[in-house]
Amino acid sequence: MEIITPELKDELLKKIEKKYGFDFSNYSEASIIRRITRFYEMYKFDNTKELTERLTTDGKLFELFVTEITVNVTQFFREPEFYKSLITKVFPVLSTYPFIKIWCAGCSTGQEVYSLAILLNEAGLTERVKIYATDLNTLVIKKAKDGIYSKSEFEEGDSGYKDSGGKNEFKKYFTESNSQFQIKDELKKNLVFAQHNLVNDSSFNEFNFIMCRNVLIYFNLKLQDHVLKLFDNSMRNLGYLGLGSKESLSLSKIAYKYEVIDRQEKIYRKIH
Ligand SMILES: C[S@@+](CC[C@H](N)C(=O)[O-])C[C@H]1O[C@@H](n2cnc3c(N)ncnc32)[C@H](O)[C@@H]1O
């Protein structure tokens, strides 16, 4: 098999951008080369010419490619301390607003969005909230919309729910059948799932809270800065921003506009 060099990677990504408008050129280089290589091996292409040709002519294969080169790992109540901090430091302020708009960007298969929706429900805020959940990958958005999870995905969430400060039984939010756990409709009513690409799609609303966790780590600094600017343009004054534990606002150009609400959990508030 041909080695995927940075030059081959750039060439392939340029053709993909031309065909589909998806620009992966500012994703972390080592990680994207590793993932293209894995895809190449998985589908046993003869050479990179064939790989490029198939990817630019077969839209279904391209969807699978997107899933392979982006990391979709997620879980309910991932890092419970983050959610605990939302309950104690963010929800009390949001609860003073008549209407609360939230953007969950890079939501993957939806566990993060439903975790948030559950806690907002327990805080008595459901009726006032609208959550826009977006991802670039149409396959994960479909699973998120369906809201159907395996037993192991459910069980992973059960302990996280309690550690996050959940007040009820986690299973109260699901209907179970044949070891599949489906999110109840009442939790879905204020959610909108849509495809949105953080690289080149624009701002589409103004939010009181933007949550984007474990997405920026896969981008280079230039793209991280671009995305943080997009969030800033989409943020109401005094709105909150929640990032992943390995991500930070501190080196970005918009850092001066935000105060730190929880340093450990990467929660910030726009003050300028
Ligand atoms: C590791 S998952 C994080 C999921 C969830 N936020 C969490 O923390 O559990 C990263 C997600 O970012 C999405 N993503 C990657 N590039 C993106 C882009 N340019 N625009 C929108 N979403 C993107 C991927 O499709 C994937 O679902």
Image (cartoon, rainbow, N blue to C red):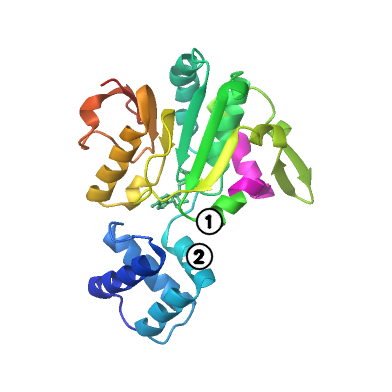
Q: Amino acid at mark 1?
A: Thr
Q: Which of the two discs, 1 and 2, labels the residue nearer the N terminus?
A: 2
Q: Nearer the viewer, residue 34 or 215?
A: 215
Q: Amino acid at mark 2?
A: Glu
Q: Nearer the viewer, residue 11 or 19?
A: 19
- Residue 106 numbered tag: none
Q: Position of residue 205 (x, y in %)?
A: 43, 34
Q: Is residue 160 left or right of residue 242?
A: right
| Residue 170, placed above or below residue 12 | above
User: In percent of the image, x 22 and y 37: which residue is there?
Assistant: 252
Q: Is residue 93 visible?
A: yes
- Residue 138 numbered tag: 1
Q: Is residue 155 magenta?
A: yes
Q: Is residue 223 magenta?
A: no
- In this view, which residue lies farthest toward the top? 96
Q: Position of residue 183 (x, y in %)?
A: 69, 40
The residue segment tinted magenta is 144-159
User: In percent of the image, x 39 and y 66: which residue is there?
Assistant: 35
Q: Is residue 186 left or right of residue 237?
A: right
Name the dominant secondary structure of the magenta segment: helix
Q: Are marks 1 and 2 in contact (CB under 8 Å)?
A: yes
Q: Which residue is mark 2?
A: 63
Crowding near pointer 1: few (<14 within 10 Å), some, many (20+)? some
Q: Quadrant of residue 116?
A: top right
User: In percent of the image, x 48 and y 61: which residue is there?
Assistant: 67
